[in-house]
Amino acid sequence: MSSVAEPSTREYEDPILDQLAMLLLSQELLAKWAETDPERVGLFNRTYRCVGRLESATGWEIETLLERLGCDTKTKKDFEDLTPNRLARCLDYMYWVEGLLADFDRQLDKCLVLAGASRFYKLAGKDLRAVKRIMSAGDFSPLCYLEIGENAQAWETATRGLDGPVGERARELWRANPLADEDAPHISAGRMEILAAPDASELLGKSVVERMRAHIDGDGRGNGCTRCQAARAGIGSVPVLR
């Protein structure tokens, strides 16, 4: 996935997204908060610019975007709890989300990815280090699924990688599912059919189509995904349903 510049990894206090939302939505509160510690204004400005880019990427108004990111925009809280360390960690999270969105062309995909990322971040206890580790883990990682546009598969796989009750429950459900198959194609049948359509780039996004085809065919030296090659061969001339 594409990446954006992130603050250096440090030990932060827990992020407080709700207080950040208060400042983003109220100029009056922001002015009071800035007076307390002017040095943190620069960090806030970086966060503000990142939120603006996410607004543009998703097409959501700022309040909707903040809610999708996991912020409570309704309940008033003590904004003084938003220390520079906590603000920095909020920014880390938003940079991570922005990086995930960067490789998708369609606005719909960006919205779906952001929603999935927010849910998983919350499930992981807002531990961004654990999130990044899990997203890159495994023979075919959640990030790999995300790159080829398999959004649901990406977050389901990531959830099974969590420690604790949530992860264990997800693994139990997977083991109990009679249709679960570790050797199944990475690309779903429906999206494989769309990939064969003349307007695949319009329907799936040009970048996603390119990564899907690269995943299936490799670089032409026999290193493509044999599972997905077999699935594509089995589709034949099945019409694409719209």
Image (cartoon, helix red, strand yellow):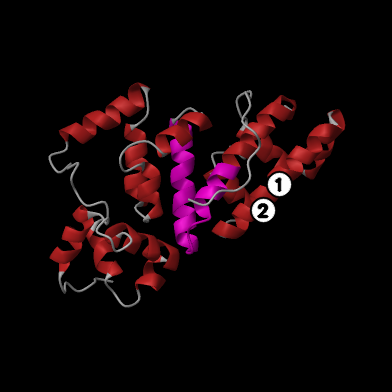
Q: Residue at x 67, y 37 (%)?
A: 20
Give residue 217's position: percent from left, percent from top: 28, 62
Instruction: Tell whether 229 sits left or right of 92.
Output: left
Give residue 145's position: percent from left, percent from top: 35, 49
Q: Amino acid at mark 2?
A: Gly
Proximity of marks 1 and 2: CB atoms separated by less than 8 Å? yes
Residue at the front extreme, as displayed: 221
Return the mark for residue 18.
none
Q: Residue at x 24, y 58 (%)?
A: 222
Image quarter of residue 90: top right
Numbered disc 1: secondary structure = helix
Quadrant containing the C terminus is bottom left
Sort mark 2 into few (<14), some (14-19) or many (20+) by Cα contacts within 10 Å.
Answer: some
Image quarter of residue 183: top left
Q: Residue at x 74, y 40 (%)?
A: 44
Instruction: Tell whether 141 sits left or right of 105.
Output: left
Q: Nearer the viewer, residue 30 or 210?
A: 210
100 in magenta = yes
Q: Nearer the viewer, residue 94 or 141?
A: 141
Residue where numbered disc 1 is placed: 48
Numbered disc 2: secondary structure = helix
Give residue 214's position: percent from left, percent from top: 34, 61
Q: Is residue 21 visible?
A: yes
Residue where numbered disc 2 is placed: 52
Q: Amino acid at mark 1?
A: Tyr
Q: Is residue 77 visible?
A: no
Q: Nearer the viewer, residue 53 or 20?
A: 53
Instruction: Tell whether 70 sits left or right of 22.
Output: left
Give residue 19's position: percent from left, percent from top: 67, 33
Magenta-tinted stretch: 95-123
